Image (spheres, helix red, strand yellow):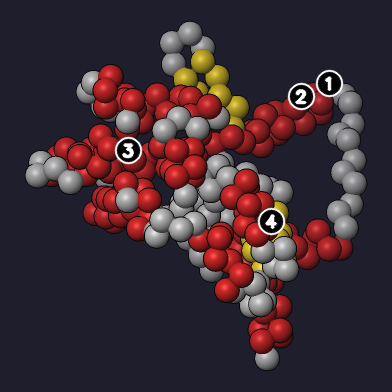
Amino acid sequence: MREVEIDWMFRGGAAALFPKAWSSFVGQLDTEEERRDPLTAYYMRLTSGDSARRRAAASAWAQWEMAVAGRTGSQLQVWDGETWTSRSMTDQQREKRLERRGSGHPPKKQRPASRELEDGHSLAASASHLVPSSPVSGRVPGDDGSMAQALLECHYSMNAGFLLEQPLLDTIDRIRHIPCIMVQGRLDFVCPVRTAYDLHAAWPEAELRIVPEACHSMYDPHITHELVGAVARMEEVCA
């Protein structure tokens, strides 16, 4: 966890991609001074002696994290002049197919997927049954687990992950001889793909796999698929 990643998540970087969720996140804070440094403001709330204040802060923290870590980018968001609504693109595609049928036009034929793609999706789907379906942590915003997670993340972010002053990448030579497979979601906006590329530049011997449709969580079926495959390959390498 580097300062650049902390800044991205809690000092306005990710806000450029999720302005609505960011507005809600900082909207929980009372003053302009707090909104300029939301990480510190949330730390004060999460360590407050007021349980209601802690719970409200944890809920807002979890909502922000889920907005950035989840698949909200795949939804069509519409402001109708009064309220926001969200609709999945799957719903949009389904409606278009129904419209085509009603107009008398035959539906477009789908091109068959490759065997590799079919197998990959099958494995990912199978693996998804082994883990929770939540894109983040399986926690409900506001429950005790969510409060503990928010405090833990905030505490580590406030202290730069408790890392030494010397950057980790400067000492990567100590482990470059170890076989490694790195898996990174292309659509991971919590830990942006830039971080994976920085690690790759310092550790070119390691294999880096950028998963095109995957987000942040290991519970994402695409990530799960890659992790299962990586573990199987590492088992062979280390046998």
Q: Residues within 10 Å of mark 2 (few under 14, many from 20)?
A: few
Q: CA distance from mark 2 to mark 4?
A: 49 Å
Asked whether disc 1 touches disc 3, contact meaning CB atoms under 8 Å apart, the reply is no
Is residue 192 visible to the viewer in this orientation of the structure?
yes
Instruction: Inspect the image, locate mark 1, and give the three-letter code of the amino acid beneath it.
Output: Ser
Q: Residue furthest top?
A: 81
Q: Is residue 195 above or below residue 218?
A: above
Q: As drawn, is 90 to the left or to the right of 151?
A: right
Q: Is residue 32 above or below residue 232?
A: above
Determine which residue is flagged by label 2: 99
- The label nearer to you, 3 versus 4, is 4
Identify the image quadrant of residue 113: bottom right
Can you give x and y, in whole percent of width and height, for residue 190 in the image? Answer: 51, 45
Q: Residues within 10 Å of mark 1 (few under 14, many from 20)?
A: few
Q: Earlier in the sequence, mark 1 or mark 4?
A: 1
Q: CA distance from mark 1 to mark 4?
A: 54 Å
Q: Secondary structure at mark 4?
A: helix
Q: Secondary structure at mark 2?
A: helix
Q: Earlier in the sequence, mark 2 or mark 4?
A: 2
Q: Residues within 10 Å of mark 4 (few under 14, many from 20)?
A: few
Q: Residue 201: which numbered mark, if any?
A: 4
